[in-house]
Amino acid sequence: MRFRHLTLTLVALVFAIGLLGANAPVFAAPAATMPPPPAALPAGPKAPPSGAAIAQTCAGCHGTEGRLKAAAFMPLAGMPKAQLVQAMRDFRSGKRPATLMRHVAEGFSDGEIDAMAAYFAAVKPE
Amino acid sequence: MKPAALFVARRALLAAALAASNAAQANETTHPKAQPWTPVTLQTALKELPKGNAAAGKQVHDGMMCASCHGAAGNATTMNWPSVAGQRFDYTAKMLLDYRSGLRDEDPRARLMTSIARMMTPQQIADVSAYYASLPKPVAPQAQAVLPAPLSAAELQRAERLVRKGDSSRLITACASCHGLHGQGKGSTPAIAGQTTDYFVRTMRLYHSGARHNDVYAGMSQFSQRLGDADTVLIARYYASLTTPPRVAQAN
Amino acid sequence: MTTRRQFLLAGATSLGLAATPAIVRAGQAPARIVIVGGGVGGATAAKYLKMADPRLQVTVIEKNPVYIRPYGSSEVLNQHTTMQALEVRYDTLRDKYGVTFVFDTAKSLDPVAKTVTTAGGKVLGYDKLIVAPGIKLRYDSLPGYSEQLAETQVPSAWIPGAQTALLAKQLQSMRDGGVFVLAAPPNPYRCPPGPYERAALMTEWFSRHNPRAKVLIADPKDSFVTDETAMLGWNRLYGFQPPAEYRSKIKAELLPPGKPCALEWLQAKAGGTPQRLDAKTMTLHTAGGAIKADVINIIPAMAAGQIAFDFGLTNDSGFCPVHRSTFESTLHKDVHVIGDASIADAMPKSGFSANTQAKWVARVIADQLAGRDSGTPVWENTCYALAGKDYGLFVADVFRIKDDGKIGRVNKARYLPFDATPAQIRLSAVYQQAWIQAFTQDIFA
């Protein structure tokens, strides 16, 4: 009972301080991990949203028009198209670790990612 | 996981937690004022770090999402955040230690780095420092629009004189005397060739105001006092241009 | 004036439009957009309309001259921030973007004459109207509760302001070993993870400042958005034991029961449904029995902001039905309703939803006025929340209009993975703070 209490306290402490390795899960999770990424969304009969319309949804974190100075997110304004496309694809496949970018990237097809990236590439950073 | 294995895992967890918890707890809860370095204490601290492994360091870079600010391969994508590609092991490690102790705390960005550095073990600090050191020196972002204007001939001449010879009338030591002829740094003095301009200027201003004070024997504070705004910006643009290809807008 | 008209006509002609919208052709002045509400939805719409076309005349009618942000406001309770830090000013929208502000309450709508009248008697004509009044708290939905009680003794603090400061004071001065009860709201309500984040942050704060204090959530529901990931965090931080049905859903090792957890979640099926408040004896009566408490926080049922009712924009649900592709009211033409007040199917009532809806509507209106097609809409809700000040989690959704004509999610994964690393968890908390700043900038700066 006392041992359990100690474990609880120390593990809680560990969590509070985050001492353990960045990549080692603290708790051994069962083998189940994230489901495999879905295939790129098929192009339906409806036209996809424009790059500009998609890009606007990013601004809540990445800044209006992707311009960001002080917050801890990647600024997107002026980012070369190929770079943003690769990043979104790597998020979507899970190759690049993230918190929620994988979930967001899953919401867009290859063509839509291209359109969004083209939009940001054309934005003057300042 | 089987109960026995879980028990063993928990014991290991406990041991690791116990070993480090005191020091970390002191940092987290009481924040003792971090002691400034002397050359001796700095060398000792760096020697005490475990040997860094660059491949493991890439895992740290990925897992802790350093790319969000510092760029996918340590090349910042705007002039606002510092590039870390090709940075000297000793300097990167020192910075992480300084963030961890709170010795470096000049603004909210630094305090963000403190949260992150406090999540890292000494091995991870060594590994990620080795990773960045293993990368080639910074590469300019391809986005031409973010780059500062190229230096004119007169500006280049003035910048090179300040960097290589200093200015005795203002008691300014040549930057190259510590940062190297090509801005490659030396020991724990950072490489600054190819560094981003906004970050460079901001840093000099923070040394000037004293908000940043993690330099050994306040060396940088003294130099930044005498340089002035115009020359600070000039030198920032000069160092930014020391990438391949040059990190300034191409004149059309 | 003539020059502008010629310019507008020339523009319309050059677009090769057969039928130029009447607004462009007949008007000599630029189109007038009136926005009721200067919160997340209204302010975002104002800024993005001006970005789309600086010539548009954009006027915001807002009661309060200074905005107090609700997102992150619970962090005043655990001393992580201050009331002052919640204040946001409209100066940049006014000075940089040219938005006009009328600090008054919008009282009535004449959808035929296309005018809005304020309490102060000002009459504003519009070509397009956006109504973003947020939510109203239905204090009287809980017998024994009232707005008066909320202001003085049993705060709600779900719309931030004096009630937030009152609740903070009560919690921070609660007697040693006291009981804090939070009555969670029924669906639908603003900010789905919010009440649970508030309870968790107070549990964390109490663990340091009032270790024998207890936190109870009395819930008319059996689940909530982010419940699995939040409860995993509570288990790790506070030793919380999730209800039986969650143990198989949470695919991670849970810490076994230890000392009793300070935080308790009374689901509806466990009798948690709040039924009556007895403010005199500080007792909350629930289906499962009476709970006497030192601090009671009631988050009551909600409906669209009162203005939506006054304007005739609501249906029986108490919220506003809209055409999904434009968020135009199904009840009044040229009136768009966005944010918490709107019925947006799968989209939660959140700041991020309001923000992406506002941007879409700004685009639609600017396009309509210029005779352009806006194409297919897309919206998002990506929201970080806290289980503790260093333990972050999130919900992240991308929304489209689905084949059934309703707004639905297109992504599969929504939440922080169960095998998230300590770095991802800690960084989610860091990003939550960063998001508050970045989000505020996107709306007001």
Image (spheres, rainbow, N blue to C red):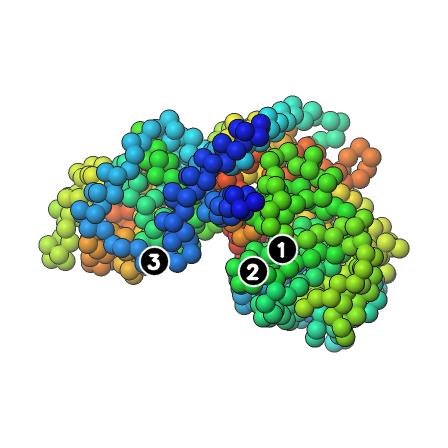
Name the outermost residue toward the front.
A1
- The disc, 1 or 2, on the residue closer to the chain's N-terminal end is 2
Circle 2 SS class: loop
CA–CA distance in space, label 2 to label 3: 25 Å
Q: Are marks 3 and 1 on the same chain?
A: no
Total numbered labels placed on residues in the image: 3
Between B52 and A82, the residue placed more toward the observer is B52
Between C212 and C204, the residue placed more toward the observer is C212
Name the outermost residue toward the left.
B168
Question: Does residue C137 appear anywhere in the picture?
Answer: no
Type of residue at label 1? Ala
Q: Is residue C427 above or below residue C59?
A: above
Residue B32 got which mark?
3
CA–CA distance in space, label 1 to label 2: 8 Å
What chain is tagged by disc 1? C
Residue B169 % position (x, y): 11, 57
Circle 1 SS class: loop
Type of residue at label 3? Pro
Circle 1 sits on which residue?
A: C262
Q: Are marks 1 and 2 in contact (CB under 8 Å)?
A: yes
**The N terminus of chain A - image quarter:** top right
Which residue sits at x=32%, y=49%? B98
Near mark 2 (Cα within 10 A), the count class, few <14, some 14-19 or many ≥20, is some
Between B169 and B37, the residue placed more toward the observer is B37
Q: Are marks 1 and 2 on the same chain?
A: yes
Q: Is residue B62 above or below residue B91?
A: above
Type of residue at label 2? Pro
Circle 3 SS class: loop
Residue A65 % position (x, y): 54, 45
